[in-house]
Image (cartoon, helix red, strand yellow):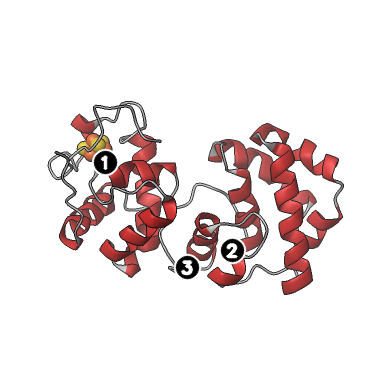
């Protein structure tokens, strides 16, 4: 039977190993201000950060403020972000989000979880990315597909729902580590604990990891 070693002690070992392996891990999306990170995060859904960075270099030069995104024609914006995939939905999300930012907050991104998740298309994951990375405010743990997969394999949670996973990780990982922990888990998911065939033989956590579900098809 599967056992779940979820505990603060186990989490502390994971945090330590990740810190040692990825001391400088940070967000791979390029941005100069919170609005740019918000938009880059919307664009990063189902797309690589590398592709997003290629697109946003020109995009942010052409549309430097939320008001610029409100004014741009939907088809023009769709064409500018087409290569990131799901471009119609993403263009709509960016425009609706920027409309609310201009209407409610003078075009500024609020430094507040409750206000952020009320913006169209912004969930806890995006809000955590923006608050943690752009403002340095630890409001939670970013739970994307990498964090979901690795935290389950490591036995830190049996959950599949990102909100429940985040709640459990927040209980185990000290608040001061939340921002870096998310970045490091994502790095680890890209380099070692990949979805299809994790490189457990190269992983520094091999001894402390129960490798839950590793022999079976990945849940995400
Ligand atoms: S030991 Fe394997 S399953 Fe566990 S974290 Fe490392 S790569 Fe992932």
Q: In which quarter of the image is the C terminus?
A: top left
Cβ of mark 1 under 8 Å from ligand 1: the answer is yes
> How far from the left and from the top, in percent, is residue 150?
31, 43
Q: Nearer the viewer, residue 53 or 162?
A: 162
Cβ of mark 3 under 8 Å from ligand 1: the answer is no
* Position of 209 relative to 101 (above/below): above
Q: Is mark 3 on a helix, strand or loop?
A: loop
Marked residue nearer the N-terminal end (3 or 2): 2
Residue that appears at 63% across and 65% down: 118
User: Could you classify mark 3 by the number of other residues whose Cα lies within 10 Å: few (under 14), some (14-19), or many (20 or more)?
Assistant: few
Q: Is mark 2 on a helix, strand or loop?
A: helix
Residue 117 - label: 2
Quarter holding residue 148: top left
Q: In which quarter of the image is the N terminus?
A: top left
Q: Are marks 1 and 2 in contact (CB under 8 Å)?
A: no
> How much space separates mark 3 and mark 2, taking CA atoms?
17 Å
Please name the residue that numbered disc 1 is placed on.
Answer: 153
> How far from the left and from the top, in percent, is residue 127?
54, 61
Q: Is 36 on the left-hand or right-hand side of 125? A: right
User: Is there any visible trace of residue 142 in the rendered image?
Assistant: no
Quarter holding residue 8: bottom left
User: Could you classify mark 2 by the number of other residues whose Cα lies within 10 Å: few (under 14), some (14-19), or many (20 or more)?
Assistant: some
> How much space separates mark 1 and mark 2, taking CA atoms?
29 Å
> How far from the left and from the top, in percent, is residue 138?
43, 68
* Position of 138 relative to 194 (above/below): below
Please name the residue that numbered disc 3 is placed on.
Answer: 136
Q: Is 44 on the left-hand or right-hand side of 5? A: right
Marked residue nearer the N-terminal end (1 or 2): 2
Q: Nearer the viewer, residue 206 or 121?
A: 121
């Amino acid at each position: 039977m599967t056992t779940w070693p979820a505990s603060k002690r186990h989490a502390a070992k994971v945090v330590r190993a990740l810190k040692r392996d990825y001391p400088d891990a940070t967000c791979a999306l390029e941005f100069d201000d919170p609005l740019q990170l918000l938009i880059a995060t919307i664009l990063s859904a189902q797309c690589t950060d590398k592709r997003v960075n290629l697109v946003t270099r020109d995009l942010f030069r052409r549309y430097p403020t939320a008001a610029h995104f409100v004014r741009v024609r939907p088809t023009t914006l769709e064409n500018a972000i087409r290569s990131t995939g799901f471009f119609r939905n993403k263009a709509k999300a960016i425009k609706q989000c920027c409309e609310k930012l201009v209407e409610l907050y003078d075009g500024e991104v609020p430094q507040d979880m409750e206000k952020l998740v009320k913006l169209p298309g912004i969930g806890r994951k995006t809000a955590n990315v923006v608050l943690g990375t752009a403002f340095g405010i630890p409001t939670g743990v970013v739970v994307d597909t990498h964090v979901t997969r690795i935290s389950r394999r490591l036995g830190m949670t049996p959950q599949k729902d990102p909100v429940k996973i985040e709640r459990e990780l927040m209980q185990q990982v000290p608040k001061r580590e939340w921002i870096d922990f998310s970045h490091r888990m994502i790095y680890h998911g890209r380099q070692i604990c990949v979805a299809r065939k994790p490189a457990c033989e190269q992983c520094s956590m091999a001894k402390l990891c129960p490798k839950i579900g590793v022999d079976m098809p990945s849940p995400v």
